[in-house]
Amino acid sequence: MAASLADLSATASRILSLFAAQLDAQGVELPERQHVGPGQIPAWDGEQLVVNLVTVAQGQPGAPAAMPFRPPAVNFHAQFGVSIVRRVHVIDTEGPFGLMVPSSEQIGEDSAVSLQDAAALIKAATTIGLADSLVDPGEGLVYELGTLGPEGGLAANRLLLTLSVD
């Protein structure tokens, strides 16, 4: 099923559905809140699995057009962020002892969950790509993973998924 420039909302919803299913199949405990969000990055307002449109540009995924094209030779790709946002330990300013910095153990626990999420997102993208679930055979699909945060007691793994759109 080809991704559609004419209906980016349906493409984003399909990405969310496919990733939620793949992550669930891997046994990843996903946040209850799962949605397509506005803007380029997740809203830092709670744990979530979220898909955001990042960009739409000319050219093939992984190789943007370096020169202008004239119709009908124009092709486009869209980049979506697939993010798992989790709560992380932060400085406690309301405890009985003033400022309480998270312990190395707490930070290590947060890191272990984050690294598991990173691996799971890459595995899910690979499975989805090999099944041609988002693009037709021969169309481009490129992905890379980065992290966001921590900010406001939250941190995320964000998979940037770039795919051909018709």
Image (spheres, rainbow, N blue to C red):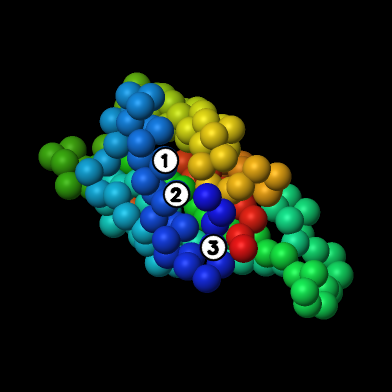
Q: In the depicted view, which residue is nearer to us: 163 or 148?
A: 163
Would you name the residue on which mark 2 appears? 15
116 relative position to 92: left or right: right
Q: Position of residue 39 (x, y in %)?
A: 45, 67
Quarter of the image containing the C terminus?
A: bottom right
Ranked by sequence position, the earlier of labels 1 and 3 is: 3
What's the amino acid at mark 2?
Ile
Would you name the residue on which mark 3 appears? 4
CA gap, disc 2 and disc 1: 6 Å
Can residue 107 be seen here? The reply is no
Q: Secondary structure at mark 2?
A: helix
What's the amino acid at mark 1?
Phe
Q: Nearer the viewer, mark 1 or mark 3?
A: 3
User: Quadrant of the rendered structure where residue 101 is?
Assistant: top left
Q: Residues within 10 Å of mark 1 (few under 14, many from 20)?
A: many
Q: Is residue 109 above or below residue 16?
A: above
53 relative position to 77: left or right: left
The residue lying furthest to the left in this view is: 96
Q: Position of residue 110 (x, y in %)?
A: 37, 30
Q: Are marks 1 and 3 in contact (CB under 8 Å)?
A: no
The residue lying furthest to the right in this view is: 67
Q: Position of residue 72 (x, y in %)?
A: 77, 74
Q: Secondary structure at mark 1?
A: helix
Would you name the residue on which mark 1 appears? 19
CA gap, disc 1 and disc 3: 18 Å
Ranked by sequence position, the earlier of labels 2 and 3 is: 3
Residue at 61% in and 42% down: 144
Q: Are marks 2 and 1 in contact (CB under 8 Å)?
A: yes
